[in-house]
Image (cartoon, rainbow, N blue to C red):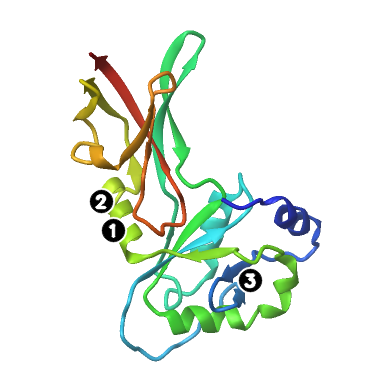
Amino acid sequence: MFSLRDFATNFYKSKLSVDLLVLGGYNNYAVKAKNRRVKYSAKEVIEIWYLLYCPRQNEWRILNSCKRNMSKAALKDAFIFTYDRMRKFQGKWRVEKQLMFPGYVFLESDNEEALAEEWQQYKGVANLLQEKKAILHIQKKEELFLTSLCKEARHLGMSKGVIRDGVTLITDGPLQGMEESICRIDRHKRLARLKPPEGSVSESILAGLEIVEKN
């Protein structure tokens, strides 16, 4: 992941009442545009995921802004992946929902031309964004991996498993059948790190995993 310090500083110092988005790889930009209606010609439909870089603790605000202000022709969906993990509080373990990719919002578009055209109209505010890698393209294999892992809810629940003779076996939860993707287990924190497909934007993904037995 990349540092958000420069971006957050410039973002909050600015007095412009805009929600800035950047489409990486196409060098296009968009801001909040209420009641805009744009028509585009229909072309071949190819759904593409993008990972939008935004200030931490603002993910849900940016997500809602995307859904509220971008046309349906340009943006099919915007979403955030979450996962369950366990934390110990006052001597008791409890399940908490966490962001799987802090500082990022996923965008999905099936009309690349429309998305690029909408954002291109607002490239004059690009000076607000200092990070060059503000948005990353998600490879299809990573998209399929995340979809298989989190399903339509885009949420990864807790799993349970055992370790026998050094081999991890998931006995319950969404990680069943994905043991080969587990690259590290922290029994104390009840967490596992998963290895996504090669070339993914993230080197590893956290997942809640409780090992109930080891021999």
Q: Which of label 2 and label 3 is nearer to you?
A: 2
Instruction: Identify the residue at horizontal 28%, vertical 58% (top origin).
Output: 144
- Disc 2 residue type? Ser
Q: Is residue 181 above or below residue 159?
A: below
Camera-nearest residue between 87 and 73: 87
Picture quadrant of residue 193: top left
- Circles 1 and 2, Cβ within 8 Å, touching? The answer is yes
Q: Amino acid at mark 3?
A: Val
Residue 21 image-quadrant placement:
bottom right
Q: Which mark is residue 148?
A: 2
Spatial CA distance of label 1 from label 2 is: 6 Å
Mark 2 or mark 3: name the one nearer the start of the chain: 3
Residue drawn at point x = 67 percent, y = 63 percent = 131
Label disc, if present, on residue 31 of the rendered structure: 3
Q: Which residue is mark 1?
A: 144
Q: Is residue 50 above or below residue 25?
A: above
Height in image: 80 above or below 185?
below
Asked if the residues shown at circle 1 and circle 3 are in contact, with their CB atoms under 8 angstroms apart, the answer is no
Q: Earlier in the sequence, mark 1 or mark 3?
A: 3
Contact (CB < 8 A) between labels 2 and 3? no
Cα–Cα gap, marks 2 and 3: 33 Å
The percent coordinates of residue 163 (x first, y second) are: 24, 22
Q: Residue at x 61, y 49 (%)?
A: 58
Other-residue count near label 3 (Cα within 10 Å), few / some / many at <14 / 14–19 / ≥20: many
Residue 214 % position (x, y): 25, 15
Q: Secondary structure at mark 2?
A: helix
Near-viewer residue (140 or 42):
140
Please report the residue visible at 53 percent of the width from the left and 45 percent of the height from the top: 102
Q: Quadrant of the C terminus?
A: top left
Count residues near mark 1 (Cα–Cα under 10 Å), then give few for <14, some for 14-19, many for 20+.
few
